[in-house]
Image (cartoon, rainbow, N blue to C red):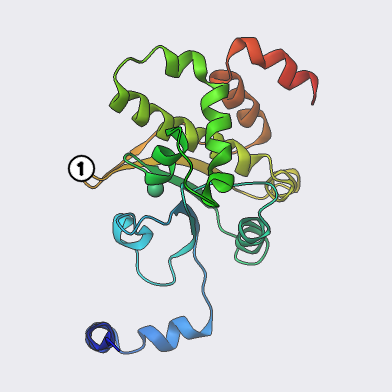
């Protein structure tokens, strides 16, 4: 059996370093956490929330899955959002996608990948919804990048449309939902300028990105 003792050794060193800098760090943290941010990101091993934004343990609440999706039937993700808003009182939810996302790439490919195709189905729906934009891009790399961005926008809207977030805004809770995209090539986050802090802004964002041809049908259903 191959062991992974080096990880335990890393852990011991890390704990010692932290305590050398701040002897009460773990004692303080073990009492309670009070993060201001909820991060919803991709499971990709290169996109680690705390590392990217330089935050310590206790400063950011994290949910990750393949392709940073927020599905309204995903009890795991919805429970995280509810806990973050109603117990931790986070003030910001950050949906962070990334260029070069394997989940988005898999969703674009015509071949089967197994069970995960069901999870990634929503990205195909996003591609269909925005086909006018995507079909106008000849370069496959640019098209891939654009779908990664559109996926972030759709997930920001999905977060905003949860009953949890709508209820929070209705009771006057301070909450802003942000859409970011991380570039693996330079380690920098791009803010997509799609922050939403109330219901009206959510409708404006939907209006801004939803293709005109599909807008009326979508809003008629509201
Ligand atoms: Zn990814």
Q: Which residue is mark 1?
A: 185
The residue positioned 68% from the left and 61% from the top of the image is 86
The residue positioned 43% from the left and 45% from the top of the image is 103
Q: What is the x, y in percent for residue 155?
A: 55, 40
Compared to residue 124, the image places residue 211 above or below, namely above
Label 1 CB sits under 8 Å from any ligand 1 atom: no
Taking the view exactly as shown, the residue that stands out farthest to the right is: 221
The residue lying toward the viewer, choosing from 150 and 51, is 150
The residue lying toward the viewer, choosing from 159 and 76, is 76
The residue positioned 72% from the left and 43% from the top of the image is 166
Q: What is the x, y in percent for residue 43?
A: 42, 57
Q: What is the x, y in percent for residue 101?
A: 37, 43
Which quadrant of the structure image shows residue 121? top right
Q: Quadrant of the C terminus?
A: top right
Compared to residue 219, the image places residue 122 above or below, namely below
Q: Quadrant of the N terminus?
A: bottom left
Compared to residue 138, the image places residue 19 above or below, namely below
Element type at marker 1?
loop
Can residue 19 be seen here? The reply is no
Category of crowding for the residue at label 1, using alpha-carbon neighbours closer than 10 angstroms: few (below 14), some (14–19), many (at least 20): few
Q: What is the x, y in percent for residue 172?
A: 70, 47
Q: How many marks?
A: 1
Can residue 150 be seen here? The reply is yes
The residue lying toward the viewer, choosing from 15 and 158, is 158
The residue positioned 51% from the left and 27% from the top of the image is 127
Compared to residue 154, the image places residue 33 above or below, namely below
Asked if residue 135 lies left or right of residue 56, the reply is right
Asked if residue 18 lies left or right of residue 196, the reply is left
Taking the view exactly as shown, the residue that stands out farthest to the left is: 186
Which quadrant of the structure image shows residue 26? bottom left
């Amino acid at each position: 059996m191959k062991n992974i003792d080096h990880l335990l050794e890393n852990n011991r060193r890390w704990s010692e370093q932290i305590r050398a800098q701040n002897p009460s760090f773990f004692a303080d943290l073990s009492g309670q956490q009070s993060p201001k941010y909820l991060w919803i990101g991709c499971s990709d091993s290169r996109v680690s929330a705390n590392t990217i934004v330089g935050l310590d343990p206790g400063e950011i609440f994290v949910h990750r899955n393949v392709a940073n999706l927020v599905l309204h039937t995903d009890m795991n993700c919805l429970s995280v959002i509810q806990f973050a808003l109603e117990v931790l009182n986070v003030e910001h939810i950050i949906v962070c996608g990334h260029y070069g996302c394997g989940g988005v790439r898999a969703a674009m490919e015509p071949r089967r990948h197994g069970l995960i195709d069901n999870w990634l189905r929503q990205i195909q729906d996003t591609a269909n919804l925005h086909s006018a934009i995507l079909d106008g891009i000849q370069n496959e790399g640019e098209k891939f990048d654009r779908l990664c961005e559109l996926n972030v926008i759709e997930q920001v809207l999905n977060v905003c449309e949860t009953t949890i977030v709508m209820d929070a805004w209705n009771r006057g809770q301070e909450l802003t939902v942000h859409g970011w995209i991380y570039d693996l090539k330079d380690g920098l986050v791009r803010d997509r300028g799609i922050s939403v802090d109330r219901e009206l802004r959510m409708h404006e964002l939907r209006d801004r990105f939803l293709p005109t041809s599909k807008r009326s049908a979508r809003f008629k259903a509201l």
